[in-house]
Amino acid sequence: MTQASGRGGGASDEAGVEAGAAAGEGRAPDDVSRVRRLETQVDMLTEAVHALIDGLETDPAHEQPADGRAARGARLARELLLSSGQ
């Protein structure tokens, strides 16, 4: 698990999906599948944005980004997106 993936999400999100699926029982199975796929894509994009944010955060002692953090954050975000097929 990456540092970015530890933020948010979790069982409560999955419970919301299940509750939403139960509330929309009249929906076609394809609709539920599409919603879950979109939620997965949003989660991956959120992880990528968090990786970029972590890379761009400044060092409070120096008020400048730490050396190489921006590049590492950008590289991690790109790898996350490539691995998910985005």
Image (tube, rainbow, N blue to C red):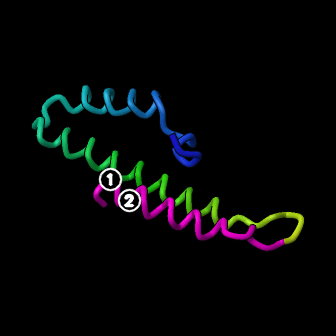
Crowdedness near tag 1: few (<14), some (14–19) or many (≥20) residues, C-alpha within 10 Å: few
Task: Measure the C-alpha gap from mark 1 to mark 2.
Answer: 5 Å
Residue 85 sits inside the magenta stretch: yes
Q: Is residue 48 left or right of residue 56?
A: left
Q: What secondary structure is the stretch in magenta mostly built from?
A: helix
Q: Nearer the viewer, residue 74 or 36?
A: 74
Q: Is residue 81 left or right of residue 51?
A: left
Amino acid type at image mark 1: Ser
Q: In this view, does 35 lie to the left or right of 27?
A: right
Residue 27: quadrant of the picture: top left
What number is the disc on residue 81? 2
Residue at position x 58%, y 64% in the image: 72
* Image position, residue 55 (x, y; %): 63, 64
Residue 72 sits inside the magenta stretch: yes
* Image position, residue 32 (x, y; %): 20, 38
| Pointer 1 residue | 84
Q: Which of 13 and 4 is in front in this view?
A: 4
Q: Nearer the viewer, residue 47 or 78?
A: 78
Q: Is residue 34 left or right of residue 53?
A: left
Residue at position x 20%, y 46% in the image: 34
Looking at the rendering, the stretch of residues picked out in magenta corresponds to 63-86
Q: In the orientation shown, which residue stands out farthest toward the right? A: 61
Amino acid type at image mark 2: Leu
* Image position, residue 15 (x, y; %): 39, 27
Element type at marker 1?
helix
Q: Which of 84 and 20 is in front in this view?
A: 84
* Image position, residue 47 (x, y; %): 49, 52
- Do residues under tags 1 and 2 come within 8 Å of each other at their CB atoms? yes
Crowdedness near tag 2: few (<14), some (14–19) or many (≥20) residues, C-alpha within 10 Å: some
Which quarter of the figure is the C terminus placed in? bottom left
